[in-house]
Image (tube, rainbow, N blue to C red):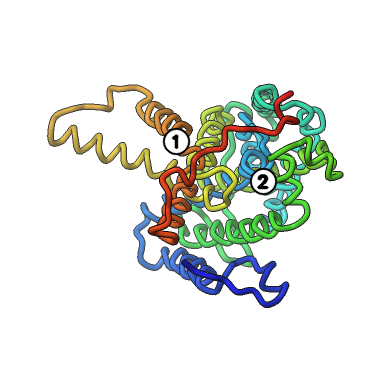
Amino acid sequence: MRTVFKTSYDTDIDLHEHWFRRGRYLALLVFMMSLPFWADEYFLAEATNTLIWSLAGMGLMVLVGHTGQPSLGHAAFLSIGAYTDVALMNAGVPFLVSFPIAGIFAGVVGAIVAIPAVRMSGIYLAIATLALFVIVEEIVILLEPITGGVGGLFAPAIEIFGIPFERYAYLGNFYWLVLAVVVIICWGYANLMRSPTGRSFLAVRDSEVSARALGINVTRTRALAFGLSAGVTGLAGALMGHFIGFFNYELFSIFISINLLLVVTIGGLGFIQGAFLGAVLITAVPQVIAILRDGLNATAGIDLGAIPGLDTIIFSLLLIVFIIYEPQGLYGRWLKIRTWFEIFPLARRDMFRRQKSYLKTERSK
C-alpha cells in the first residue's frame, strides 16, 4: 500500500498523486506516439477510431458521469461538429480555424438547448435530448446547399503548415493529430474537475438540494456542463467526419448515441479513464465478433452472419450485465481489484457493497 506524504499545498493540488502515476501516464503517451512506427495500417486505423470515440466519450462523461444528466441525443452534436467543420473548410477556412469553431458552435447550440432542457431530469431530459436529435437530423436534410442533404459531404483533406493529415494517404499524421487533440482535451478535462466549476458539477450530480444549500446555481451549472459536453462532442464529430471521409445524416444515427452511452456506462461513470476503457471495448468487440464469426464458419461450418443485429444483442447484454453486477464499470472494477491487493489481508467481502439508503431531502423526488 502506497503512502503519500504531502508537505506543501502544491503537492496537495497536483494533478497526479505521486511520481509513479505520472510516469505511467507518460509511458502510455510515449507508447501511443510510437504506434505509427511499428503498427500496421489496420491496427493504426482502429487505434485512431478508438481515440475519436474516447474524445466523444469524454464529452458525454461531463454530462452523464460528472453532472448526472442523461442524454440520448448526443449524436446530434457529433453531426453539428462534423458538418460545421467540413462546411467551413469547403468555404476556404483552414482546419486550424474551422476545427475549434466547430466545437464552439456545437457547444453554443448545446448551451442554448440546455436552457429549457436542464429544468427537466431523469427520463424527461433523456426524451428531450432524443427530440433534439430528431430536429437536428431534419435540419441537416433541409440545409442541402450546406450539408449536402441526403447525398452527404466529402471531408476535404487536412493540411497544417504545409503538412498533410489526410486519413488514407497519411494515416500516421492523422493519428498524431487525433492523439494531440485527445491529450489536450483530457488534460483540460482533468484540471476542470479539480476546479470550483468541476466540484460544482459533482455537487449537482450527488444532490441538487445540497448543492442549492451551498449556494450553487444548479440551472446555470447544468447548462454549463451541457455546453461543455456538446463542445467536446462536436470536436469528436469533426474528427470522425475526416476519419470516415464521406458521410451523411445516416452516419450519426440514434445507435451512435446508444453506443456513446455504452462507452461511459461500461467504461465507468464518473471516471475520465472510463471513457477510454469504454471506447476500447466498443471498438474492439465488433472486431472480436467478426474474428470469432469467421473462425466458427471456417472450422465448424456455423454461419453467424445470418443472425441480424448480433453486435447490438451482445452490446445490450454487456450493458445489462454491467448495470446489475458492476455499475461502476471497468474502471470501477479495476479500482476494487487494486484496493483489494493494497489492503490484503484486511479486505472484506462486503467492503464495496452499494449504499441503498438516501438522504431524506432526496426521497421526495
Residue 304: quarter of image: top left
Q: Position of residue 74 (x, y in %)?
A: 63, 35
Q: Nearer the viewer, residue 220 or 237?
A: 220
Q: Amino acid at mark 2?
A: Asp
For residue 47, the mark is none
Q: Residue at x 52, y 38 (%)?
A: 354
Q: Amino acid at mark 1?
A: Phe
Q: In the rendered image, is residue 222 in sight?
A: yes
The residue carrying mark 1 is 322
Q: Quadrant of the C terminus?
A: top right
Q: Nearer the viewer, residue 230 or 187?
A: 187
Q: Residue at x 66, y 42 (%)?
A: 81
Q: Residue at x 45, y 46 (%)?
A: 330
The residue carrying mark 2 is 85
User: Compared to 234, does 125 lie above or below?
Assistant: above
Q: Position of residue 125 (x, y in %)?
A: 69, 26
